[in-house]
Amino acid sequence: MLIPCPHCGPRDVGEFTYGGDATKERPDPESASAEDWCDYVFHRDNPRGRHVEYWHHGQGCRLWLKVTRDTVTHKIEGTELVGPWAESAPKQGRDVA
C-alpha cells in the first residue's frame, strides 16, 4: 500500500506507523474519569469501509497525517497533515491515485 504523504509524495506503508483512530475525541483532562481515559486509550472499533486514521511518517518527514482509507480495499481517498506545523509545512500537491 502506498500512502500519499502531502509533504514527501507517495511512499510505502512500511515508512509509516499507524497512530490510531482519528475520529475519537480526546477526553477533557479536567473532567474525564479513569473509565473515560481507559475507553479512549484501549477500546477501538474495527470499522469496515471508509475510515479516518492517524499515521506517522517516521521514515520520511516525521510529520503526522490523517489518512482517509477504505479498510476493506485499502484504497486511500485522501491525506492531510495534522498538528501545529501543518500550515507551514511545504506540500507536494500530489493527488491520490
Image (spheres, grey):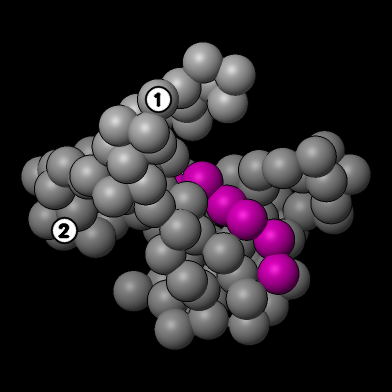
Q: From what the image shows, is residue 80 above or below residue 76?
A: above
The residue drawn where x is 28% and y is 50% is 42
Q: Quadrant of residue 13?
A: bottom left
The majority secondary structure of the magenta stretch comes to: strand
Residue at the limit of the structure toward the front, as seen here:
34
Residue 66 shown in magenta: yes
| Residue on which the image places disc 1 | 33
Residue in the image at 63% along x and 82% along y: 59
Q: Check disc 1 and give the amino acid type.
A: Ser
Element under disc 1: loop
* Quadrant in which the C terminus appears: bottom left
Outermost residue, right side:
88
Front in this rendered view, residue 84 or 35? 35
Q: Is residue 52 visible?
A: no
Q: Position of residue 79 (x, y in %)?
A: 52, 48
At x 28% / y 37%, what residue is drawn? 39
Q: Is 90 within the magenta? A: no
In what element is the residue under mark 2? loop
Residue under label 2: 73
Counting labels gives 2
> Which range is magenta?
62-67
Which is in the foreground here, disc 2 or disc 1?
Answer: 1
What type is the residue that disc 2 sits on?
Answer: Thr
